[in-house]
């Protein structure tokens, strides 16, 4: 059995708790989000959408490194994810390890 990273574990907690959304349009409809995660394989439009979402919600944005977002979440074709739980978003952003890279808002 493969050992999961802390970030992957916290993402799993957010999913079990129901404090997440997948997809750009679903994320746009949220009233607030505390963290945006975008897949390294996402198209330019998805990357641009993740940037606009991070600006809209005034939150951090991370891009996956080694694994795709679909591999981290076990959801097929996942490209953009919003975490809405404040504490889990903080835990993920403090423990990105080898799974995530933080992007500045202008990138």
Image (spheres, rainbow, N blue to C red):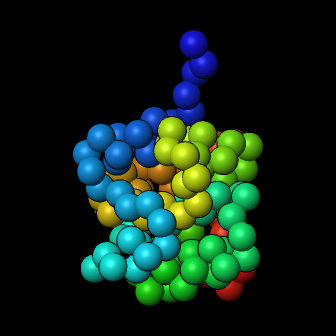
Q: Residue at x 63, y 74 (%)?
A: 46
Which is more toward the observer, 89 or 28?
A: 28
Q: Indicate the quadrant containing the C terminus: top left, top right, bottom left or bottom right.
A: bottom right
User: Considering only vertical position in the picture, is 38 above or below 8?
Assistant: below
Percent across and percent down for residue 70 are 58, 46
Q: Residue at x 74, y 43 (%)?
A: 66
Which is more toward the observer, 90 or 56?
A: 56
Percent across and percent down for residue 13 are 35, 40
Indicate left or right for 31 with 67 as reference: left
Residue at the top extreme, as displayed: 1
Residue 64 seen in render = yes
Residue 100 seen in render = no
Indicate left or right for 46 with 52 as reference: right
Q: Residue at x 72, y 50 (%)?
A: 65
User: Considering only vertical position in the picture, is 23 above or below 11?
Assistant: below
Indicate left or right for 26 with 54 as reference: left
Percent across and percent down for residue 56 are 44, 86
Determine which quarter of the picture holds residue 97.
Answer: top right
Q: Residue at x 40, y 79 (%)?
A: 28
User: Considering only vertical position in the picture, is 52 above or below 72?
Assistant: below
Q: Indicate the quadrant containing the N terminus: top left, top right, bottom left or bottom right.
A: top right
How many numbered dots are placed on residues in this image?
A: 0
Residue at the front extreme, as displayed: 76
């Amino acid at each position: 059995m493969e050992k999961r990273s802390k970030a992957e574990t916290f993402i799993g907690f957010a999913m079990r708790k129901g404090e997440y959304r997948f997809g750009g349009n679903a994320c746009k409809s949220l009233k607030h989000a505390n963290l945006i995660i975008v897949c390294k394989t996402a198209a330019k439009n998805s990357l641009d959408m993740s940037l606009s979402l991070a600006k809209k919600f005034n939150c951090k944005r991370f891009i996956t490194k080694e694994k795709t977002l679909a591999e981290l979440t076990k959801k097929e074709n996942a490209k953009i994810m919003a975490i809405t739980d404040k504490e889990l978003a903080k835990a993920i952003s403090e423990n990105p390890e080898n799974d995530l890279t933080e992007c500045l808002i202008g990138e």
